[in-house]
Image (tube, grey):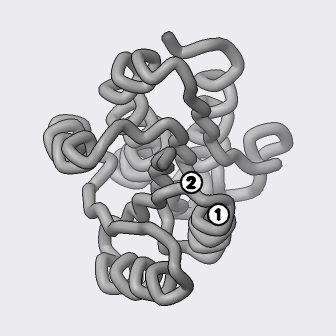
Amino acid sequence: MKRALVTGGTSPIGAAICQRLAADGLHVIVHAHASAERAHALVSSLQAQGFSAEAWRANLADIAATQHALATVLAGGVPQIVVHNAGTHDDVTMAGMEETQWRDVLGVSLDGFYAVVQPLLLPMTRTRWGRIIALSSVTARIGNRGQVNYAAAKAGLEGAVQFPCA
């Protein structure tokens, strides 16, 4: 059975992605950071429907901790699909933005993408099949007042998936 890891799996979009992947016959790994209870509830719901799923918790902005936590994911088999849906926003104009607001938003989207995808690339390649998907936003292209950090993060994701990562 192919495995799919969905970061931000407890958000409304993430939960819909998890539901679809599970319905398509994949084992779904539902990622959560602060909402571990929602991840477990979604996993229970998927399992009640006869689907295969598990929850996984990690703070994607902490690269070392995320990569260490991926060992539990890999112990069950290599995810061949990674959907990087995790993201956050902290809206404020650039003039009033604190460094932590900048770093926190980029940390989840960009550092989180690296933290999850980089250690999975070689194992995924060895399976000879894989897909990496990163969700973006129209804000990456046209911007939005008070969201320069969010726009930069999403534009960075678009750049990261334009070419093969391997």
Secondary element at tag 1: helix
Q: Toward the viewer: 129 or 33?
A: 129
Q: Dot 1: few (<14), some (14–19), or many (≥20) neighbours within 10 Å?
A: some
Q: Amino acid at mark 1?
A: Ile
Q: How many marks?
A: 2
- Residue linked to disc 1: 17
Q: Which residue is found at the position 27% from the left and 55% from the top?
A: 59
- Residue linked to disc 2: 85
Marks 2 and 1: CB-CB under 8 Å? Answer: yes
Q: Toward the viewer: 63 or 100?
A: 63
Q: Toward the viewer: 25 or 155?
A: 25
Where in the figure is residue 89, as x and y percent of width and height?
Answer: 54, 61
Where in the figure is residue 100, as x and y percent of width and height?
Answer: 33, 51
**Eyeballing the image, is 110 above or below 137?**
above
Q: Toward the viewer: 161 or 145?
A: 161
Q: Dot 2: few (<14), some (14–19), or many (≥20) neighbours within 10 Å?
A: many
**Eyeballing the image, is 163 above or below 150?**
above
